[in-house]
Image (tube, grey):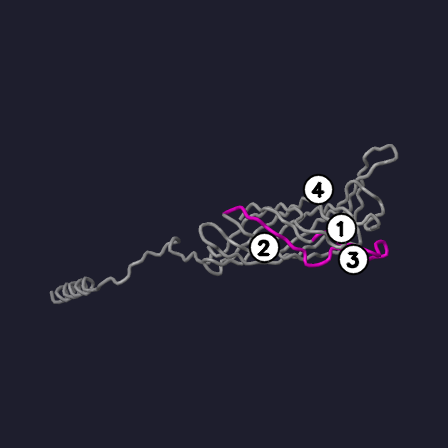
Amino acid sequence: MKKIITIIGLMLIGSAYTKAQTVVVEETVTRDTVNTNKQNKVSLGLMLDFTFYGGANEKGLEGTLANSLGVNTAINLKYKLHKNLKLVSQFGINVENYAFKKTDTNTSFPSTLNNSVDRFMVTALSLSLGARVSLGKGFYAEAGAMAKWNFANAYNYETKDANGNNVEVFVRDLNYIKNFNYDAYARIGYEVINIVAYYRLNDMFQTTSIAPVVYEVPRLRLGISIGM
């Protein structure tokens, strides 16, 4: 009998102690309560640029809009440093056509011919790094630098044969086009569309035995981008 009374007493004391506790914080841990701030810092997208010449004459070669389209397709990686500031890196394929006219008919670069169309075609792997600042209401500004490895190139020209027929010629793997180009760039955009400017920081050409005297195509390209 004493054992029964003792057990009942202990049960009553335990019940009273449990009711006397106050719940300060109650939380059910699920997958939804995991902190996702780190996940939200990184975002991935696709950027597509279309560019044209936007510069004046440059050392003997005058840029022309005709046949000067450039296309840059890149994966766009953004890392949020602050709610209004992001680091931006792009990796992709850059194709640029540099149509030009000689500013002097005596210019022998890249040939002595007087062609109806002259242009350089360069295909490169590109890698950029920049910073994007949010201006509010979907507007932003971005600036950075881009390096390009020119793994393919060609000189393309159109002329006429002895019978007056149009002839198009491609001369590939030019050794006087440098392997690497370096650009500074800037963007001003709204949502998924932005206006972009690229400025080449180095000379595109180098002197060789085949081209002992070289000139330069304009360094500035202007265009529009679509993507995030």
What is the number of the mark on residue 206? 3
Q: Secondary structure at mark 4?
A: loop
**Is residue 210 on the magenta stretch?**
yes
* Disc 1 target residue: 61
Q: Secondary structure at mark 2?
A: strand
Q: Nearer the viewer, mark 3 or mark 4?
A: 4
In the rendered image, residue 85, in percent from the top left (x then y), is placed at 49, 59
Q: Earlier in the sequence, mark 3 or mark 1?
A: 1
Mark 4 Cα shell of 10 Å, populated few (<14), some (14-19), many (≥20): some
* Disc 4 target residue: 67
Q: Secondary structure at mark 3?
A: loop
What's under tag 4, amino acid-wise? Asn
Residue 201, image quadrant:
bottom right
The residue nearer to you, when weighing 154 against 134, is: 134
* Disc 2 target residue: 186
In the rendered image, residue 12, in percent from the top left (x then y), is placed at 15, 63
Q: Secondary structure at mark 1?
A: strand
Question: Which stretch is magenta?
Answer: 191-218
What residue do we see at 69% from left, 44% from top? 65
